């Protein structure tokens, strides 16, 4: 049975209460303070260009529809593709890599800045408008496979977390939010 194909709808409560949750980039309703995730002691980036030419893992080829986000809330979008809290950084995926989460403040609608119900957030990590999905995922699988087949980096599943030159990562051993066909 195929799961995780196509669009995945999740509301904020589901994202924060999923198994393996240690989301340090979440807003605490009582404290009102947002703590950015620390990925190996490094902080987040404000622009995807700050990451240079790194190639992330593409956890799924399609968007995650995030619902019930609060206008003005600060979120940390995963740029490495290794998080268990897709699409948000969990602070663990980017440890021991050169990736850092992207800081994003939830806007209102472009027209009137009021509450917006759904946000189509990129889950392939190759969007040109992060964190929004721009449909780059449509032709991405072929590009990723070609890049990985030509890469001379270390692709040993026992010793490599992610190859930043091509985006190769070993298969996930956990049962995170993104499930593959079985």
Image: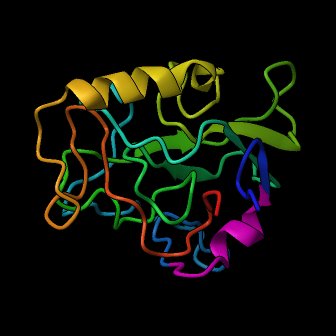
Q: Is residue 106 magenta?
A: no
Total count of labels:
0
What segment is highlighted magenta in the picture?
10-21
Which residue is depicted at the point 50% across and 66% down?
A: 84
Give the side of residue 96 with respect to residue 138, left or right: left
Which residue is depicted at the point 86% across and 39% down?
A: 116
Q: Nearer the viewer, residue 106 or 160?
A: 160
Give the side of residue 113 with respect to residue 95, left or right: right
Q: Is residue 119 visible?
A: yes
The percent coordinates of residue 173 (x first, y second) are: 42, 73
In the image, residue 77 above or below residue 35 = above
On-image quarter of the C terminus: bottom right
The percent coordinates of residue 92 (x first, y second) are: 34, 67
The percent coordinates of residue 99 (x first, y second) are: 27, 45
Q: Is residue 52 visible?
A: no
The percent coordinates of residue 120 (x first, y second) are: 73, 36
Which residue is depicted at the point 66% across and 36% down?
A: 62
Color scheme of the displayed model: rainbow
On-image quarter of the N terminus: bottom right
Give the image quarter of residue 132. top right
Which residue is depicted at the point 40% across and 28% down?
A: 144
Give the image quarter of residue 60. top right
In the image, residue 88 above or below residue 144 = below
Give the side of residue 151 with respect to residue 174, left or right: left
Q: Nearer the viewer, residue 32 or 2?
A: 2
Give the side of residue 41 with respect to residue 147, left or right: left
Q: Is residue 19 magenta?
A: yes
């Amino acid at each position: 049975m195929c799961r995780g194909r196509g669009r995945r709808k999740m509301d904020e409560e589901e994202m924060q209460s999923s198994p393996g949750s240690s989301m340090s980039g979440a807003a605490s309703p009582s404290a009102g303070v947002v703590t950015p995730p620390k990925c190996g002691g490094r902080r987040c980036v404000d622009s995807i260009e700050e990451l240079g030419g790194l190639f992330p893992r593409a956890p799924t080829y399609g968007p995650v529809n995030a619902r019930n986000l609060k206008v003005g809330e600060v979120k940390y979008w995963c740029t490495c593709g290794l998080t268990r809290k897709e699409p948000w950084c969990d602070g663990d995926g980017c440890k021991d890599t050169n990736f850092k989460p992207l800081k994003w403040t939830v806007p209102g609608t472009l027209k009137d800045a009021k509450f917006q119900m759904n946000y189509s957030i990129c889950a392939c990590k190759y969007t040109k408008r992060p964190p929004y999905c721009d449909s780059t995922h449509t032709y991405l699988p072929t590009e990723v496979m070609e890049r990985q087949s030509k890469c001379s980096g270390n692709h040993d599943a026992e010793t490599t977390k992610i190859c930043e030159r091509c985006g190769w990562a070993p298969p996930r051993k956990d049962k995170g939010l993104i499930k593959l066909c079985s």
